Amino acid sequence: MRRGPGTFRFLPAVGLLAAGLCTGASVPTPTESPPGNNSCLGLYECVPGILLPTWLPQDPSPGDKAARAIVYFVAMVYMFLGMSIIADRFMASIEVITSQEREVVVKKPNGETFTTMVRVWNETVSNLTLMALGSSAPEILLSIIEVCGHNFEPGELGPATIVGSAAFNMFVIMAICISVVPDGEHRKIKHLRVFFITAFWSIFAYIWLYLILSVSSPGEVEIWEAVITFAFFPCLVLLAWVADRRLLMYRYLHKHYRADKRRNIVLQVTGSDSSSPKADIEMDGVSKASQDPPDSWPGWQQPEEETRRVVTGILKDLRQKHPDKEPEQLLEMANYQALLHQQKSRAFYRIHATRCMTGEGNILKRHAAEQTRRVLSVPLQTPECPLRQGVSLSFQPARYQCFENCGWVHLTVVREGGREDLPVAVDYRTEDGSANAGSDYEYSEGTLVFKPGETLKEISVGIIDDDIFEEDEHFFVRLGNLRSGDAEGMFDCDSAEHPKGRLVSPLTATVTILDDDHAGIFTFEDKVHHVSESVGVMELRVLRTSGARGTVIIPYRTVEGTARGGGVDYEDTFGELEFLNDETMKAIQVKIVDDEEYEKQENFFVVLEKPRWMKRGISALLLTDDDEDNKKLSAEEEEARRIAEMGKPILGEHSKLEVVIEESYEFKSTVDKLIKKTNLALVIGTHSWREQFMEAITVSAGDGDEDDDAREEKLPSCFDYVMHFLTVFWKVLFAFVPPTEYWNGWACFVTCMFAIGLLTAFINDLASHFGCTVGLKDSVTAVIFVALGTSIPDTFASKVAALQDQYADASIGNVTGSNAVNVFLGIGLAWSVAAIYWASKGQEFRVHPGSLAFSVTLFTIFAFVTISVLLYRRRPHIGGELGGTRRGKLVTCAIFISLWLVYVVFSALEAYCHIKGF
């Protein structure tokens, strides 16, 4: 994978510069400090934190103060690394939880039912609940822990971190996602309705925050305000779910719209023609030609069909590119590519970015390498031939055919296994079927004796010929009474407990006598023939029964049904079959085109035409159609003509064969196997503590080229070793977290929540101590440093998603949802607890607007501008929210980065009273 532009490499420098401008400049003495700004200068007196005490003495020398600042800063960065590692485990548990499936029975409109697997969690609901919680857990828990850990007093660090992180996500991360997409490519949001909902709530959340801080009850947060703030979270999830499922009014809004030349909006129903398809608003991220699955199909999930389509295409391409590869090799290659091209969740990209950053390696390449090693480590097991106990006798083959003029038919009995020096004997006799002994064949019975070393014996049965037209007939020959002998040739019956030999199937041979007095009846074996599309060339047998006299030509041709000829589903075939005298079977070959469809049920027909008898002798004279001069035939000639008419070739019952082309069972099984293996929860989840500790101490190559053929795991770089060394303590420590396989991921989820909360408490204390040591206010420290530290993993995750995903939902679509969830959970829950606590004591929960209100207002304005720019980029000449031309990307990135810089600088200036806030 190519490295993205170094947009975020200068971000710490920008933060330090802004802090330096604010703390180092001469500060005018305001006549009255704004509410909430108790001091326009930074705090130089540190107070004990939730877990960490103050570093005494309180007034160190400048050198000691610089050393303390470095220690606090390095410790805070190290805590952020630990937060990334435990968040990796946390997101893995969320991926396992949200990937749980259940089996449902789906009923189609025609009444047909089929069983399919659907996910328990709706994708939109999981993105706005567990995924957003996993992505923003540090910010949310920081706000909650700060309030609860400081005697339910409002703090600046938590809310400022939420707003600062939202600004970084909205401006910087989106700028990076736009810039890393290769020139000329673009990514669009697929679920546009859901994006509209989350974008609205991401802006409304901060407008609401300003209203309760500065308008509704300035300086105070009442219980109803805090509770409503928290209650907006389920409202957001419910509305997004309704939009995703097209329930209520959204069912009637699924239309395409276009603008005419007068800019009037013209309603266009789905499926109608459009003169300007590029102007259509795609609310589902699907083209106008596509049709939604019927709403009457409960449990239907488009992602499953999409995954099946992608896997099918991958298998086709691999078979064309690598025709010499073994099936197992193709399966592993297809598994890697299916995982590479699969629609991935936000959790996967977050985990992938963290592991590449900390030296744990590329998830997909590491998984592919492990699968390859596992296949190679399996020893080849040669099938063991079963021990043969004693001698076995049987007919080989079990079916025989002969004409009634053949004289004799010879049947073969084979001896296998046992001692070769042991003589054996077996009795045989004939039995009537439709053929009768004495009139159709000669009755026969006797004993076959196998001397030492003999393995084959023949039974000969005489066949009786007649001149009567009759159907094909059959009789049987059975074996019985097996006996073994000694060196003198004395035979005894074997004991049941210790047999020296045995008769094995087939014990009975069937002999069919074909009538040779008739030209024959020509027919297919069955009325319907099912064939797999992977068969290549199909052979259809045409049988000649009830006679085989003379040479007969049978014309044939293929006729289209639902299957199309001309090389689409099969190759058109026509011609003639020439049956020579005494020839009873011919084959028609039809080439079937293998288009490797997962499900297929199409048919065509093969039709036999009227037979032509190549007449010979008296038949040629008596069956002429043009009786010259109306010549009268004698009585003998009339009888001969009548006999010849009875012997003419005719078509049988199955002269029109229906051929049903079905999907290849092997191909369908391979696709099903691949779909099961492409469950990302199996890739990123863990199954045992041993596996977790092995991963913790192993260093692997990080980012690399994600091309289709790069399955091999590369050697780690110097950067990978350095990052592994820095994070190995956290990796080993958090390897004690329960594996994701336990309790379907919930054990890991709960444990990670406690671990993240503990690390968040340390980060809260370190950030406060760092700020007071260097003279930074908590609000500035939060916006510049804490927000940056909590957002770095999301930055790399969004960058990877922008490069690898074909849509923009995973990279920027979830940013808006996370920003809204941060306010509703992080601030709403913390303030609800604090407001209820102070109300129980008969006091008010005082929150001064101060820098928070100013920061929220500034972010809201800039967020509205950002959303407007993103929607403008959906226009046809740009192509989508991400990517586009180089010039377009540079302009958009410059706008977004400028908005973030202005936000950071203005927030810092307002905090230090350089500009007036609220």
Image (spheres, rainbow, N blue to C red):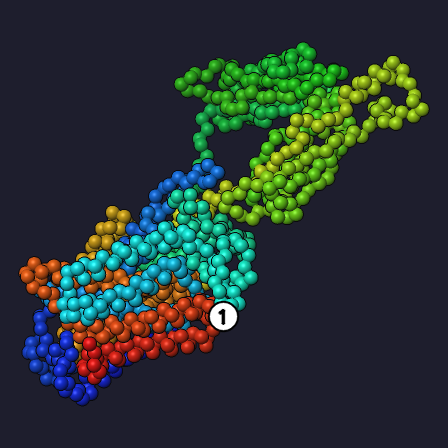
| Vertical side of 443 occupied by 758: above or below | below
Q: Secondary structure at mark 1?
A: loop
Q: Is residue 473 left or right of residue 886?
A: right
Evaluate whether residue 412 shows in this view: yes
| Vertical side of 731 occupied by 439: above or below | above
- Residue 413 is situated, as x and y percent measured from the top left of the image, at 58, 23
Q: Is residue 648 left or right of residue 369?
A: right
Circle 1 crowding by C-alpha within 10 Å: few under 14, some 14–19, many from 20 = few
- Residue 438 is situated, as x and y percent measured from the top left of the image, at 67, 10
- Residue 313 is situated, as x and y percent measured from the top left of the image, at 50, 53
Evaluate whether residue 361 shows in this view: no
Q: Is residue 512 left or right of residue 247?
A: right
Amino acid type at circle 1 is His
Residue indicated by mark 1:
877
Compare residues 801 and 379 and report the one nearer the observer. 801
- Residue 799 is situated, as x and y percent measured from the top left of the image, at 37, 67
Q: Is residue 665 left or right of residue 160?
A: right
